[in-house]
Image (cartoon, rainbow, N blue to C red):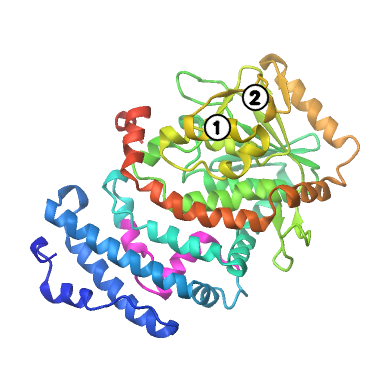
């Protein structure tokens, strides 16, 4: 540590903490926050990751790993206390992106603050120190606690504040254009169209908020009985002018460090879980046992392909129409990340063996095959796709859908009750954080996607 050129007094002060956790939250918070802040200051004194000598690199690893180990011990004892302090004893609902920021301000050093994140966000993924892993460990501990985790799930199922204003505009105009998505009416259906034309309708930081708001507004819309999720036409030379459902996570942005860790948690606890469960109300428990959600059936319209995150979306929908030439993949092995909640849901459609083949070995599922039809409810030739979609809308809405919410809840309580999802997300938050900063992720992207030659 001293050979790395770090100040002796600061190193000695950092080493002085014995890491012993007590039952006294206030005392532990003060002691460990001081140590974590000293450690963060020492790390900031080192050169950027690519410019470090071998000794400096070893010092950085020692700083990060020792402080992370003590954070784990602290959270193992005090996660509930901290979460209750942040939420006013569960009186306030705070989304995950705000929760990690509030935690950084309330207990400095526990998770990276805005200054540290800004420094990391300016770097390519392979050059980051992975400070956001501490966000994953914190969120995992919160989710692992039954009461706190269910409260956080509730917070993420609430309509976003922006959706209330956009709902008014949609009611007036019948259309809505947001970054990453559009919303319009198609008969008695609200049609959400995913848009990222340059990147084959991939999902990234530029699309996430707009798509979730569109899903909120579609769910709340009183003039529609069902909702549809579809991909827009794209600009890529190979597919120009064609509609594609989704290419999943934007791997180019991921490689260049433009996808935050919290993005994964926002996505799967927010928009994806809203597709699956509907929207929560502040004063009503969204657990299926209490029936406190606002929901309607969702139909997926798959053209071209549903890759990675696109396939994950289909597992949260009630009915899927696919073009006969479309296909689905979950290339988690080639990406080096966990494919959202697919590990929780895919096996219910395909059985365990096909699910493992798709997730662990990249098996492609063509929609118009016996295996593909386990996920896709209806197949149509591309030339007849629009007519087939109109027929589905008519079929779902001709007799009303008054029992849809009840039937959806009855299915979920046997398949994936909210508490099961909470437990899954506790594991996912921890493991995805490690995957997101793994050297294997960079190697996979360079090997399988030629990512170093792609411009963000």
Q: Position of residue 401 (x, y in %)?
A: 86, 43
Q: Which SS does the magenta portion mostly show?
A: helix
User: Which element carries disc 1, helix, strand or loop?
Assistant: loop
Q: Quadrant of residue 319?
A: top right
Tell me if mark 1 has few (under 14), some (14-19) or many (20+) residues whose alpha carbon lies within 10 angstroms of its own. many
> Under tag 2, what secondary structure?
loop
Q: How packed is label 2: few (under 14 Cα within 10 Å), some, or many (20 or more)?
A: some
In the foreground, 273 or 212:
273
Q: Does the magenta stretch include residue 182?
A: no
Query: Percent x, y for residue 296?
Result: 77, 46
Q: In the image, is residue 95 part of the stretch drawn in magenta?
A: yes
Task: Write the start and end of the magenta stretch as one range.
Answer: 93-118
Task: Using the image, determine if residue 205 lies above or below residue 33.
Answer: above
Which residue lies under the disc numbered 1? 246
The quarter in which the C terminus is drawn is top left
Q: In this view, does 429 lie above or below 41?
A: above
Which of the numbered marks, if any, corresponds to residue 146?
A: none
């Amino acid at each position: 540590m001293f050979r790395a050129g770090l100040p002796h007094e600061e190193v000695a002060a950092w080493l002085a903490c014995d890491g012993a956790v007590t039952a006294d939250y206030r005392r532990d918070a003060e002691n460990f926050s001081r140590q974590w802040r000293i450690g963060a200051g020492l790390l900031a004194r080192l050169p950027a990751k690519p410019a470090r000598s071998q000794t400096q690199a070893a010092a950085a690893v020692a700083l990060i790993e020792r402080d992370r180990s003590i954070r784990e011990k602290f959270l193992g004892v005090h996660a509930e206390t901290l979460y209750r302090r942040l939420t006013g004893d569960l009186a306030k609902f705070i989304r995950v992106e705000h929760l990690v920021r509030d935690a950084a301000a309330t207990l400095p050093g526990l998770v990276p603050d805005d200054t540290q994140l800004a420094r990391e966000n300016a770097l390519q993924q392979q050059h980051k120190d992975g400070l956001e892993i501490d966000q994953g460990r914190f969120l995992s501990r919160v989710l692992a606690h039954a009461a706190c985790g269910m409260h956080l799930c509730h917070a993420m199922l609430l309509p976003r504040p922006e959706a209330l204003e956009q709902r008014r505009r949609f009611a007036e105009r019948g259309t809505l254009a947001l970054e990453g998505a559009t919303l319009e009416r198609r008969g008695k259906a609200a049609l959400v169209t995913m848009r990222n034309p340059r990147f084959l309708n991939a999902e990234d930081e530029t699309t996430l908020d707009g798509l979730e708001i569109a899903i909120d507004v579609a769910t709340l819309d009183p003039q529609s009985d069902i909702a549809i999720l579809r991909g827009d036409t794209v600009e890529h030379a190979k597919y120009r002018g064609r509609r594609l459902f989704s290419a999943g996570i934007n791997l180019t942005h991921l490689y260049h460090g433009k996808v935050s860790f919290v993005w994964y948690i926002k996505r799967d606890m927010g928009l994806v879980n809203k597709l699956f469960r509907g929207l929560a109300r502040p004063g009503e428990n969204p657990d299926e046992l209490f029936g406190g959600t606002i929901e309607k059936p969702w139909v997926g319209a798959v053209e071209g392909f549903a890759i990675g995150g696109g396939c994950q979306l289909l597992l949260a929908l009630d009915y899927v129409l696919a073009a006969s030439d479309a296909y689905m993949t979950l290339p988690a092995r080639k990406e080096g990340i966990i494919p959202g909640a697919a590990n929780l849901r895919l096996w219910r459609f395909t059985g365990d063996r096909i699910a493992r083949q798709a997730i662990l070995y990249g098996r492609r599922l063509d929609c118009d095959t016996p295996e593909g039809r386990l996920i896709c409810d209806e197949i149509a030739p591309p030339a007849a796709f629009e007519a087939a979609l109109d027929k589905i809308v008519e079929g779902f809405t001709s007799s009303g859908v008054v029992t849809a919410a009840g039937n959806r809840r009855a299915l979920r309580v046997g398949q994936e009750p909210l508490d099961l999802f909470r437990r899954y997300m506790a594991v996912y938050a921890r493991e995805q954080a490690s995957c997101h900063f793994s050297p294997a992720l960079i190697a996979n992207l360079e090997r399988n996607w030629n990512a170093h030659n792609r411009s963000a």
